[in-house]
Amino acid sequence: MELFYRFSFEAARQLPRLPTEHPCSRLHGHSFHLEVRVSGPLDPTLGWICDFATIEVACNTLRDHLDHRTLNEIEGLENPTSEHLAVWIWNRLHTILPDLTEVRIQETDRAGCIYRGT
């Protein structure tokens, strides 16, 4: 069985390794939408895989760290592609949510990234 939790945040970024003529090499912002998934067996006593409150607290901590920030200024996100952001988020959530199976980031209504760990 699998649970998911969605949240969003607003942030600016610049992708410094791109050629200067690429639009993403300039500072720009996104309304990022994230979805995290946790899977595991259904606890027969509690009737759930994981308490949604645990997932929510972990995600709120991340959102507070990322929301209305310039991602390049956050340690580990000096080149904040969606792929790097997904790995960065995974590394922080996986310690709190050991049954984490997926981090899904949507940076626009048409584009995003899915990371399922290494």
Image: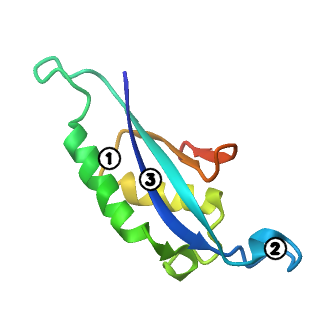
Q: Which of marks 1 and 3 is in front?
A: 3
Based on the displayed image, in which of its 4 quarters is residue 65 positioned? bottom left
Q: Is mark 3 on a helix, strand or loop?
A: strand
Q: Is mark 1 on a helix, strand or loop?
A: loop
Residue at figure coordinates x 34%, y 53% from the top left: 59
Q: Label 2 crowding class (10 Å Cα cut-off): few <14, some 14-19, many 20+? A: few
Disc 1 and disc 3 in contact, CB within 8 angstroms: no
Q: Label 3 crowding class (10 Å Cα cut-off): few <14, some 14-19, many 20+? A: some
Q: Nearer the viewer, residue 65 or 28?
A: 28
Q: What element carries label 2?
A: loop
Residue at figure coordinates x 73%, y 79% from the top left: 16
- Amino acid of disc 2: Leu
Kindly report the distance in space between the C-alpha atoms of the residues bearing marks 3 and 2: 26 Å
Residue at figure coordinates x 49%, y 78% from the top left: 74
Where is mark 3, residue-wise?
8
Where is mark 1, residue-wise?
97
Left or right of 70 in this view: 21:
right
Left or right of 13 in this view: 5:
left
Q: What is the residue that sits farthest to the left in this orientation?
A: 45
Q: What is the residue that sits farthest to the top in this orientation?
A: 44
Image location of residue 118, percent across then percent down: 56, 48
- Amino acid of disc 3: Ser
Image location of residue 56, percent across then percent down: 27, 48
Image location of residue 52, percent across then percent down: 24, 38
Quadrant containing the N terminus in the rendered view: top left
Left or right of 55 in this view: 83:
right
Based on the displayed image, in which of its 4 quarters is residue 68 positioned? bottom left
- Amino acid of disc 1: Leu
Q: From the viewer's perspective, is residue 117 above or below residue 38?
A: below
Q: Which of marks 1 and 3 is nearer the N terminus?
A: 3
Q: From the viewer's perspective, is residue 21 above or below residue 88?
A: below
